[in-house]
Image (cartoon, rainbow, N blue to C red):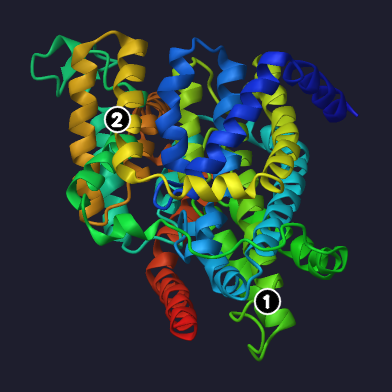
Amino acid sequence: METLSSLADGFAVALTFQNITLALAGCFLGTIMGALPGLGPSNGVAILIPLAFTLGLGPTPALILLTSVYYGAMYGGRISSILLNIPGDEPAMMTCLDGYPMAQQGRAGEALALSGIASFVGAFFATWGLVLLAPQLVKVALLFGPAEYFALFTLAFATLGGISATNQAKSAFAAALGLGLAMIGVDTQTGVPRFTFGEVHLYDGIDFLVAIVGLFALSEVFIFLEHRGSPEEEKAKPKIEIGKIIPSWSLIKYCTPTMLRTTVLGFIAGVLPGAGASLGSFISYSMEKKLVDPKGKTFGKGDPRGVAAPEAGNNAAAGGALVPMLALGVPGSGTTAVLLAVLLSLNITPGPLLFSQNPDVVWGLIAALFIGNFMLLALNLPMVGLFVRVLMVPPRILMPVVAMISFVGIYGISGSSFDLMVMVAFGVLGWGLRKLDVPLVPVILGTLLGNEMEVNMRRAVTINDGDYSILIGSPLTIVLWSIAIVGFILPIFVGGVLKSKMKSARDQEAAQSD
């Protein structure tokens, strides 16, 4: 009853004109960001962070806007997948397998609407999972001391590369780079400047938001500048008729068991640190195919259940990833790592005390997720035609807008030209890392959690009179270290197999469509 009472208070916070307007704007912009190939939720949220701060929004409104963008981008990723066979982001990759064949059969509108309904089901039940699970996880988190938090942060670094990582060594390098960046500034314990090279602006360290906007948003602009004028620019012009938009009741009923099963799978995948929506989407599609079409007669050839499964799975995973982020302060996915940076920039510390110290923020956010889900369902069914036209916007128009928002937003927040130069440097760094296929999320996570990780390690060792054995001195730390080791090693053996299966499934589908 206490949880339901807190949720009711959250609706009282969320149901204001400003917050409803922001949720609607976030859902709309997020769907557009998700629909544009290559952007995805992480980039979408990063691009709009400067806008949220430039508008002078408080903590709750800013988070409502950005989480609505997050959910909207998860919805929008399926549009280019179904119409163009180009995933808006990695979680939408599995939607191509049956969504594009449905579009080729003249059922594009039906596939888009069905994927919107599946996304709603996955996100709606995942939000209920967040309501029920996060407060319970908080009670467990209150048992954590400095040594346990150090082990938990190590777990986050070890697993954030996740099953979808192409190379764990590159993930480890990215995490080390992020930790190195976190050390820039004045040492909080000794007061000695570290890696500042005499630059006064670096005494406070590197601003999270500057790093995030540079790595994600500006690097996207640099990638565009590199490939401008290429034939790929012309690919974003759908040539497929939408057809009937509203799916029949019998089709929805036919796909309902699939949606419910894959929602559970996706949510579990999202709660696991580092697994995220990519794994949720892949597991949902694979398990459903083995369950209902073991001989492969219909899946991959335009089966509606092959659209519903990954969409419900990846949206449920998006909701599940918020659980460890809010309850433990450990992001469950790349996008929640970006949202974690926003919370820290607003002087709000995620973790066990968030629910007691900032209940208006956390419950207002959760209530807004429920509202945003219904908004997204209402937007995605009648406005399919509009979102399809967004795919026709050429990158040469879109990317200057992204660059303008980035520069104006960051300057509006800090008023420092030095921060603009740092942002450009991070943009070049992000461009280089993407060229080398090094993941960006561990860099951000290192920058975010590096200081907290160092503080907790020093505190634990100081409490134990300089004895480092305290870092593995309790059953909980041993469990966390064990999970971290398994989480880092397992993808080396399993991740390659999963990635190759995902790639072969797409190649096979592409060959069939040709």
Pointer 2: what residue? 403
For the point 63% across and 40% down, the residue is 323
Q: Using a 10 Å C-alpha cutoff, classify the residue at mark 2 as few (fewer than 14 neighbours), some (14 to 19) or many (20 or more).
A: many
Residue 108: percent from left, percent from top: 62, 64
Left or right of 211 in this view: 270 = right
CB contact under 8 Å: marks 2 and 1: no
The three-letter amino acid code for the residue at tag 2 is Ala
Pointer 1: what residue? 303
Image height of 268 relative to 175, above or below: below
Q: Secondary structure at mark 1?
A: loop
Between 28 and 211, the one nearer to me in the picture: 28
Residue 188 sits in quarter:
top left
Residue 207 shows in the view: yes
Image height of 470 relative to 294, above or below: above
Q: Indicate the quadrant containing the N terminus: top left, top right, bottom left or bottom right.
A: top right
Q: Rounded to the nearest whole Å, what is the CA distance between mark 2 and mark 1?
A: 40 Å
The three-letter amino acid code for the residue at tag 1 is Asp
Q: Indicate the quadrant containing the C terminus: top left, top right, bottom left or bottom right.
A: bottom left
Residue 117 sits in quarter:
bottom right
